[in-house]
Amino acid sequence: MSTSLWLIPLFPLVGALLNMLFGRAIGRHAHWVAVSALAGSFVASCVLFARVATGEVINSTLFSWVGAGDFETSVAAYVDPLTGVMLLVVTGVGALIHLYSVGYMHDDPGYPRYFAYLNLFVFSMTMLVLAGNFLLLYVFWEAVGLCSYLLIGFWYTRPAASQAGKKAFIVNRVGDFGFGLGIMWLWSAVGTLDYDAAFAAVVGLEPSTATGIALLLFMGACGKSAQLPLHIWLPDAMEGPTPVSALIHAATMVTAGVYMVARSHVIFEQSPVALTVVAWIGVATALFAATIGLAQTDIKRVLAYSTVSQLGYMFAAVGVGAYAAGIFHLVTHAFFKALLFLGAGSVIHGLGGQQDLRKMGGLSSRMVATTITTTVGGLGLAGMPGLAGFFSKDEILAAAYGSGHTGMWALLLLGAFLTSFYTARMLFLAFYSGPRMTREAAHHVHESPGVMIFPLWILALLTVITGVAFGIPSEHGTRFARFLAPVFPIHEAGHSGVVALMLLVSAVAVFVAGVVVAWSMYMAAPVRADAIGRPRTAIHALLLNAYYVDALYDRAIVRPLLALSRFLAGVFDLRLIDGLVNALGRAVVASAAGLRRLQTGYTVNYALTMLAGAVAIVIFLLSR
Amino acid sequence: MDAIVFPPVLIGPLLPTLVVLAAAALVLVLDVVPWAIPREVAAMVALAGMIGALLATLARWSAPGRAFRDMVVLDNFALFFNVVICYAGALIVLLSMDYLRRTGSESSEYWALVLFATAGMMLLAAAGDLVVVFLALELMSLSLYVLAGLFKRELASGEAAMKYFLLGAFASSFLLYGIALIYGATGTTNLDRIAAAIASRPRDPLFGIGLGLLMVGFGFKISSVPFHMWVPDVYQGAPTSVTALIATGSKAGAFAALIRVLTVTLRGVPPDWAALLWVIAAVTMTVGNVVALAQSNLKRMLAYSSIAHVGYMLVGLVAGGVGGAGSVLFYLLTYTFTTAGAFGVITLCERARGEAVEVSDYAGLARRHPVLAAALGLFLLSLVGIPPLAGFVGKFYVFGAAVRAGYFWLAVIGVLNSAAAAYYYLRVVVFMYMREPEGAATTYASSFAGSLALAIALLAIVLLGVMPAPFVDLAQAAVAPLLR
């Protein structure tokens, strides 16, 4: 029976293979394969969810993968309520985004390839979530990175897209470097990588070892979930098609880091230092990215920085031990951020590819369904009372306050104000302010087809009801937290009436304040397009350029590394330099007997190097 | 008067090598028989020799044998390497068939020399005596020197052969001198007896110098820094099929001898020589990767990449023990298929002016020849170490063994290196998938044998990545007897 859970990854894998191998024959019908694969996967996830909802844990081993001596790792699944929640989000939101893509990618020449990659991604993500040990987790951790590379660079004829794909891949590799080391260290420390056994064995590990392992694992999470200082790839990743941004860079892939930290919370709990680092990196990222979001003029970049910022909230939550709150925010964020991206996609579609907020405005009368649904999503992100985002964010703030991190709470509250502001700004500029596009462009504005609007309504509905249904706090935590109690013991203590009221009032206050400030700046009086996004102060320029982090990395890391490579090539690879010189020489004496170029001079150099090496080795062996 | 007692001649332990040598002899004979024989026959004989040797190897599995007074030791260790070498040889024969015809360099000497080189590699893996090590090494090397200069009309090929020969001879002289010193220190060249002689006085300086000089010789053959200078020039200049053989088979043979000599003779010695290997490993992988970043020629880039991979393998050797040495064997297996495959793709790519050797020659390959591009892409991703391909599992075992043995920082350097290496491998993928060619495009030189070789290599890297366990067990079982 439990082997049937493998259907969840199998459906999208088969879909991907079909579209990859027979893409030419399938052609315009590629979506039938891909969407039905996701639908099947979603149904299978629901069935599985119903089984684990009772708190049952399912282990299923497919086959033994790598093993040597006392060590063995299998291709095995580990399913508990946390896995169930993640699977529902990945396949559910994934299915909606697949459906939406049918309309959005309609005219793209790479239609089958697109759906093949999308299926492949969902396959990797479900396997990542299902994995029952760290090695398999790592495998699919890499695989989602690879898929995101393929999807970001999907429109590879655009240099910016292929550049962004490469950047995402390489920045992720930096994180994976730490992640891989963390796994190896864990292995050498406890001798196993299976979740159950490893978590049982880490209790009582030496604090320094636990800290080292936890921080290295967190480094991987920083890469995948775009936390400081590895956040730079996510905003660039918006070069991919918009449904891809919604799926990968908002709803699922970036949540892998949060999932991994929550999944290995036993390891992190062995090290208070590591938990503190996680929480503070989260808080710092939340604020940092929110401030950048204030100044962006590209609608997708606003959303991208908002994703980075919201992920910071999730890490802040898991860092203070409120794992259920972090995962709850992950779920609600998946709903409203997917909604926002798809809504933005609908806007971009309706405007013929325009992403610049300065050239939008006045869409509310022309794209009614998009406007309503996207506004719901925006309000969910901004934290309007009653919507999902309000409850989940409130849980995080309460957990920070309740665990004694008052400073953290204040910063997160400030972040919430910024979030409310930039979200309202985006909504006002796109939909409600006067139109700023050319007359020609305005003429072509049209609402998107039903296949794109339908997923928007579903996501809007989820944004409205999820909070009320699962997120209302009580003496014993939220319903969601109680559901996850078999995985995460409930930490969140109930607050006394006064404190709870204070937290509630402050959360509502920052939401209202953010909207009001945005109103006064962008709606009270009509704004001119050229007045937006032009830096008037140094701080504004700093925010607009995302604190120049990219330029900093370029100067401090990329260029020195390339210079070093060239320098070493000069030292170790004489031929490379020689080749250049000779190319010059050949141009001068084109027909001369310059062909007799046996590099005997270099051969002597090579031999001398060998001799030096030999002398060094002998001296070493004699001086032992 | 006592009769002279001849040692019993047991050819059983030599059987796999003899099969290859017999095939080589047959190729030479076929060349001089008076009646006309189709050219393909020589290639078929060579292929049959490789497959026959593989079968002979499998037939003797787990039946260790010694011959000629322990000069040849055909244990599971040697058999494991025989499998690697036979596969490498067979792949190279398949890749060479149409490649040679296309480049107009077909000759029966080629097949004979490939077979002789392979025999040398196999003998190297089974050498139980330093004299046999030297003989086998020379048999292999001399054949490869000639093969590197196969393209007689091309200057780079001749230059490569000349350099390879001069520097190789230089390295061999170190090796020979080292053997002489070890003989002087212990009175024997047999590995087991050296171990016994040295166990009581592990700090004998004469032995130390001898071993150091031996390491210089091996360092040259496996191309570890600072004995790697010849690698890029030779890999670039030699015919690509020969490059593939040098990069896979000869490296496997030299590694076999290195592992056997070090683990057997230093069995009872405190492991302080690991510090030396530590430094060589770290420098080798770093230099290989960093310089590879600056390359624009694909063969040269793969040459530096192969240097980097030697560094990774040395990490496993530093870790030592069944886990460490076993991980090196497994890594060599994955590396052989991956590297032979990557060079194999080059032999199948053709341009108007000759071979497609610049990275930029591969621009837009994915659009016109998607299967070929996907194959090269997978080989490169395996070299990066992306799961679930073979390269990932190989790296996992090597670095895992290092961490377990307490060499955490060496593993850090290794993982950091493999993270940086992604950049230059990925650049080729970017060219194949995301660039349009400037000028004439590279075309696929149709070849059934070559495609078959690529298919085998692809299957192997997927299989080794998805189900590595039985092969890792074999590798570890192969090194276990050496450590006893």
Image (tube, rainbow, N blue to C red):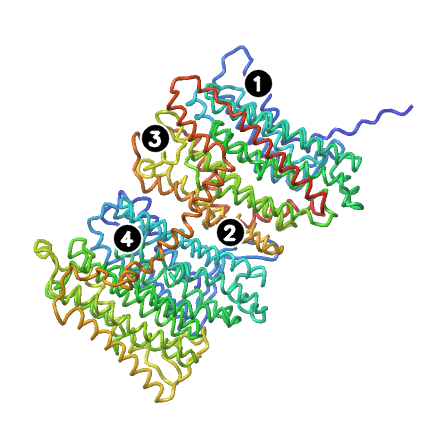
Residue beneath disc 3: B443
N-terminal of the two: label 1 or label 2? 1
**Are the two marked residues, 4 and 1, in contact with CB atoms closer than 8 angstroms?**
no
User: Can marks 1 and 2 be said to lie on one chain?
Assistant: yes
Q: Amino acid at mark 3?
A: Thr
**Are the two marked residues, 3 and 1, in contact with CB atoms closer than 8 angstroms?**
no
Q: Which label was assigned to residue B28?
A: 1
Of all residues, the one furthest to the right in this rendering is B1
SS for tag 4?
helix
Q: Amino acid at mark 4?
A: Glu
Q: Mark 3 against mark 4, which lies toward the viewer?
A: 4
Q: Chain of mark 2?
A: B
In this orientation, which residue lies closer to the viewer: B8 or A593?
A593
Q: CA distance from mark 3 to mark 1?
A: 34 Å
SS for tag 3?
strand
Q: Amino acid at mark 2?
A: Val
Q: Residue A245, located in which quarter of the rendered image?
A: bottom left
Q: Mark 3 against mark 1, which lies toward the viewer?
A: 3
Residue appearing at x 44%, y 79% in the figure: A491
Q: Residue A519, located in which quarter of the rendered image?
A: bottom left
Q: Is residue A254 left or right of residue A269?
A: left
Q: Residue A609, located in which quarter of the rendered image?
A: top right
**Residue B385: image x %, image y %?**
47, 48
Q: Which label was assigned to residue B415?
A: 2
Residue appearing at x 39%, y 33% in the figure: B358
Q: Is residue A487 above or below residue B18?
A: below
